[in-house]
Amino acid sequence: MEDDEAEPSATQDLKAENARISVQFKAQHALVVAFFVLILLFHALGIYLFCSGFLLSRLVLQDRSECGVPPVELHNGYTPGLAERGCWHPKSFDKAVVIIVDALRYDFTVPFQPRPGDEQPHHFHNALPVLYETSVQQPNNAFLRPFIADPPTTTLQRLKGLTTGTLPTFIDAGSNFAGTAIDEDNLIEQLFAAGSRIVHLGDDTWHSLFPGYFEPTLTKAYDSFNVWDLHTVDNGVNEHLFPLLKPSMQGRWDVIIGHYLGVDHAGHRYGPDHPAMNEKLQQMDDILRRVMIEIDDNTLLVVMGDHGMDVKGDHGGESDDEVEAALWMYSKKGIFGRGHGVPSEPPATAKERPVGQIDLVPTLALLLGMQIPFNNLGQPIEEAFIGSGQTGDYENLAQVGRITAAQIHRYQEEYAKARGLNDSAISTTSTLWREANERYSNVHATEHSMLGGGQRNAYEGYAAYQAENLRICRGLWARFDLVSMAMGIAVLLGTFVIIAVYAHGIAADRSTLTPLLLGWGLSGTVAGAAIGAAFGVLPDVSLVQTVSFGAAISGIIATLIGLWPARQVLKSPLPRTFWGGLCMLATLLLCTGFAANSFTIWEDEQLLFLLTTFGVLMLGSSLGQPERDDQVLGVTNSLSFLAATRLSSLSRLCREEQMPYCRSTYYASATSSTSARWQLVIPFAVALLLPSAMKSFFARSRNYNGSAVVWIGFALRIGLVMVAAFWVLDAADDGEWLPRISKDTLKTSRILLAQIVFALAFAAGYATYFFASPLITVTTEEADPEPPAPEEPADLTEPIFTPLHAPKPRSKLIIFGYANTHGTRYFLLPCAWILALQLVQKPMGQGTLALCMISILNVLEIVDANSLRRSPLGPVLLALLGSFYFFKTGHQAALSSIQWESAFIALRSIQYPWSPIMVVLNTFGAQILCVIAVPAISLWKVPPKQPGLLGRVAGAMATHILFYAAIALATVVEAAWLRRHLMLYRVFMPRMLMSITVLLLVELSGALIALVGIRWSVVSVNEVFGWPGT
């Protein structure tokens, strides 16, 4: 009776103990997640401090040029101050129509000239002849020049240069999609202040830069980021532009700005060598011919590209194709001319007689009678002021050159005062300024002041001064705040030490030490922020900088101090095993290699070499395993890993610096941004093969049961088929395969499919993950029949015949999948994410990302077969895979490789935050998938009731982050060291920006997706089998 009462009591005690341990685990889990968020905060603060010193913007002077205050005394008795006839110089035009053809590359505007290896014209050739024809046939009415943009070649930064006459700086590159109003002197503001009525049509970027300056009843802005839409903006500009050019509307406006986006969007969507580009350029040709007819004699027509585009139709960098735009000016007056010995034909290439885009600002200002913006650095364009005579009006050219140079000189003096620059910084420009003034004075002091030779000499003197001043300013604005950079590096280094110790310097369960480290770290962060705020009130000290540095460095020091009570369990974080040493060596090779521009340019090939090396070594290690099953498992997965890596290397997107030694295969051609028809087979192959491959890994450990069958066997496969259908519809829309179906219907169908896939991946996928039971099958094996009782002997008194009664046979409970319960249960989370990530990849990228998924499963099996679960091999190998497949999904460490069109996969127009999120998933999908898979390294082939799982998962995640932290720290230090290198902006800085972006994204995904996700996995398993220790 007492035994019967004790059994329920013991059961209740066991339940209570399980409940207590469950609560303890959930609390420890929350603290581990919070600790990784704290590490993320330290990295974010360090990156902010470094970038605020490295990506230093120039000092913007708030001075404004005034119509009545010219920078120099005007000759010829001209009285300044009247905008009606010209502030500093007689104006040539009352009105202007400024047409921006976004991404109008110079070679789009000149006749095709065969070259060796390029004998046939492309789709973008000879489709916009009007600019060249008028410049040749009517040289006094029009001229065409190469129009060189200053990088970064993004629209917002280019518009700043085209209206202020200043150069962009590094900090501007990150603001292309978050434009704020220009707060310095600019041409739009001056026109508005002078009472000019400005009408804007097209790209809405103008409204973020110049809010309130445009006529509200006539202006029409359009969304500029829907790069899949080639016609809406252009048609809208046409709809409003031509009515304004009618005589009845002439009194309603003074300046019209029309910003066409079709050419740019055709480049982004298809690449320049596509029939759609030819169609858009022909459309622009027709539009410009109509505008030429409509304008009157007092209206200046300006047509220009804000930048060019590379061979794939992208832009943002500083390659020749990206910076070589076109500028064309036209007037019915016939006042334009050419300098001595300059032919009327436009240059055949953009390398001949180019003008800078900043030169447009003083040119337009003087032609329209405005004062030159205070911060301008450009010089007047010669053709606009030299006159239409045979000899050339060099006196007028010298006058405008003198006025412009004088304004530059005035700006230079004010900037030197504001920056506290000494005379040595501007000594060369001072000398050239004196020489130019002497030339001008000598000409006007002689009897032959009207002779062109002297005036031309004076003009050339002012041009030389402007060019030298521009060179000096480029150097001055590359000044770096070394103190802030050093602060950032110190914070990144300190955080790296914390992660290294946490990952490999603790010989105990990390989850038990995490609360201590978190408490010290948070306390130090708060205290440091308070101290920083106190120092921030001092004059000439940045409050944000001191608070950021104080919080970060104090938090890091406090976290390290928090290790002191646990010093007995600390050890050196340096590796002691072959695999640990190899992982550190590979990381060090990458870190040091990024100091060489050639290594950085060919990073994808370096990663291929490293992954192949690891694959071969894992194959050898597997062959040496004592158990036959481990040998077979390790060898087959090593061979699969090598095959997947080599196959994925066939997907390649070449950057400009790799040419001609690289051949792009990611798109239909090297000049295309669309997939080839044969590549549409890839998504269907993925839908057929990937779920089957994943099923085999689950089935191998008898875990293809329950929710795994539902998700992998049905939901994932159906979702991947829908993904394949999405990209077929996209290709049908691009290629106009279904002319009877409207483009709007195709677009609606695509968007609906994409939204269903996202809902399936995140809503259904996460629901499956949250509520799934362990992926096991339980069966009962019936007991053997009870054996017959032995016959009793005749003489029962004999001891040898004492009867024995054997226990009654019992049935057996068999659990299939027990050994891999934790691993397969958690891996449902990457299985949900792979569907969403596949959708945002183009067909070729889907194939490589599927191979990445198979490689991840290969790594899990290899780690198990070689008993390397606690080695850094798994986490580091996943980091290398993430980095490698970043390149194999059609990306490079360059702004121009971002696939912006992915922002509209599930949307009709740009919507925040969903559009940027889809771009992030497209760009960094491989890194996200790999970091989500990291906990599986510690959970794969791990049976229930294993103690210390949370600590081992945290160690694996810390090791994975340590790799990215090392790369980020190395590229930051190398970018700082090479800050004057010729390839800084082109190679080193983009790679540094990519490193810090990936680091923050991996930490965010690791903490909020992977580490948060293991809670449901571990709890669901332990609720069935019991918690460790019970």
Image: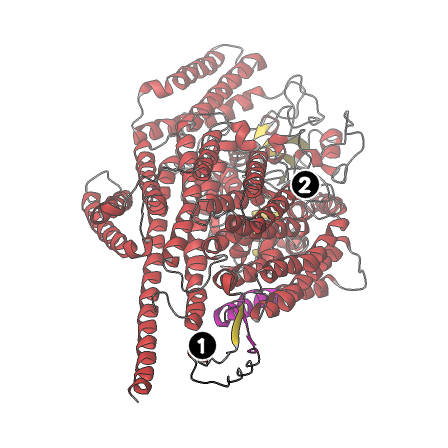
Please provide the residue range marked out in magenta. Answer: 756-784
Which kind of residue does numbered mark 1 sit on? Ile
Q: Is residue 766 magenta?
A: yes
- Give x and y (percent) for residue 339: 63, 20
Quadrant that contains the C terminus: bottom left
- Give x and y (percent) for residue 15: 34, 76
Answer with left or right where residue 410 lies relative to residue 640.
left
State whether residue 533 is above or below residue 696: above
Which residue is pictured at 46% across the width and 62% down the height? Answer: 943
Q: Secondary structure at mark 1?
A: helix
Which residue is pictured at 31% across the width and 51% down the height? Answer: 508
Question: Visible in this render: residue 555?
Answer: no
- Give x and y (percent) for residue 476: 39, 27
State whether residue 464 is above or below residue 588: above
Residue 494 image-quadrant placement: top left
Q: Is residue 836 magenta?
A: no
Q: Dot 2, how many residues are within 10 Å of its Cα: few (below 14), some (14-19), or many (20+)?
A: some
Say whether disc 2 or disc 1 marks the residue closer to the N-terminus. 2
Residue 315 image-quadrant placement: top right
Most distant residue in the bottom direction:
1
Which residue is pictured at 50% across the width and 54% down the height? Answer: 933
The one of 59 and 848 positioned closer to us in this rendering: 848
* Label drawn at residue 650: 2
